[in-house]
Amino acid sequence: MQALRVDCLSDDLSGMTLADLPPPARVPGEVLVQVRAASLNFPDLLMTRGEYQFKPEVPFTSGLEFAGEVLEADPDSGFAPGERVMGGNKTGAFAETASVPAAKLSPMPRGMDFPAAAAMGAAYSTAYTGLVELGGLREGQWVLVHGASGGVGLAACDLARALGAKVIATTGSADKIGRIAALASPDAVLLAEGRFREAVADLTDGRLADIVFDPVGGDVFDESTRCVAFGGKLMVVGFTSGRIAEISTNIPLIKGFSLVGLRAGEYARRFPERGRQIQSAITALAEAGRITPAIDRILPLSRWHEGFEAMANRELVGKVVFVPGS
């Protein structure tokens, strides 16, 4: 089978190759899946550089998540050959077949195609865990979503709107404002440069944001501390800016907001029943047509370099989805 391998860590993707490998051997407790689509996530890029908190031993097959059809499963796994599933593991998705623990899979939402299902999992799980589980999102609240051109940011915008919140999306690129507005339909899109607190205050009639969802960090995080409403939550999701910000503890004390760290995958591992309930809630929203993953482009796996380069160069608005075997 074809698989995208990371043979050595590098800053320029030179350590990656599309290799011919034997299919993975399924062990008891795992499900063997024919991968029909797999989506690219920012941690996939970071892992090629050794910059993600999880550092797999090289060589490894890249890819966090996929959608496909079951080939083999244990009789008591809850899955049967031919069933359409979505999920994944920390690695292994960018291949023609993958073998993952049954607990890492769920049935695809009815009516959804493979690329959309592959694009939905990690992004919407992160958004739901942050906004609903940890953020306590309520209808009518204001949500400020940074990095809104990325898969997680767009998912947060989409989910917040579906749940009745009012959304302010931000981006670091003026060229992306129109595309974000068309895809996510937020109440406003701002350029996250300099002092944007005043713009947030104007849009919210001085209330500011009940939840700030921040996958960017750096200067955006610094300014976000000025954008949180009293009693609100500033959610640390990631550091795509490249700088891990610091905060003086007197700031949340004086302003009366909470700083919340978000690791959706770890949350689901520690609280598996809550993880299953989160997935069920996301599936129900998808089947009702209330949420739709945003896809920037669908590429054959042979064009993996194009997808990774587009992510590294911050060209994307939405997810890249690879189709193995094409």
Image (spheres, rainbow, N blue to C red):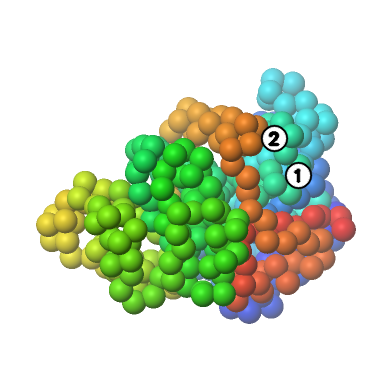
Residue 3: percent from the left, percent from the top?
Answer: 78, 58
Q: Is residue 84 above or below residue 127?
A: above
- Residue on which the image places disc 1: 114
Q: Residue at x 48, y 68 (%)?
A: 171
The numbered mark, 2 or 1, whose residue comes first in the sequence reads 2
For the C terminus, give its image quadrant. Answer: bottom right
**Residue at (43, 52) in percent of width and height:** 167
Using a 10 Å C-alpha cutoff, classify the residue at mark 2 as few (fewer than 14 neighbours), some (14 to 19) or many (20 or more): many
Question: Which is more toward the observer, 26 or 239?
Answer: 239
Report the side of 34 relative to 108 (left or right).
right
The x, y position of residue 134, in whole percent, is: 36, 41
Q: Secondary structure at mark 2?
A: loop
Task: Name the residue located 38 percent from the left edge and 37 percent from the top edge.
Answer: 139
Horizontal and vertical percent position of residue 53? 46, 59
Indicate the secondary structure of the residue bearing disc 1: helix
- Depth order, front residue of 85/115: 115
Quadrant, the N terminus: bottom right
Do tag 2 and tag 1 residues touch (Cβ < 8 Å)? yes
Which amino acid type is shown beneath numbered disc 2?
A: Met
According to the picture, the residue beneath numbered tag 2 turns out to be 108
Cα distance in 3D space between marks 2 and 1? 8 Å
The amino acid marked with disc number 1 is Phe
Residue 312 visible at all: no
State whether residue 11 appears in this view: yes
Q: Quadrant of residue 191?
A: bottom left
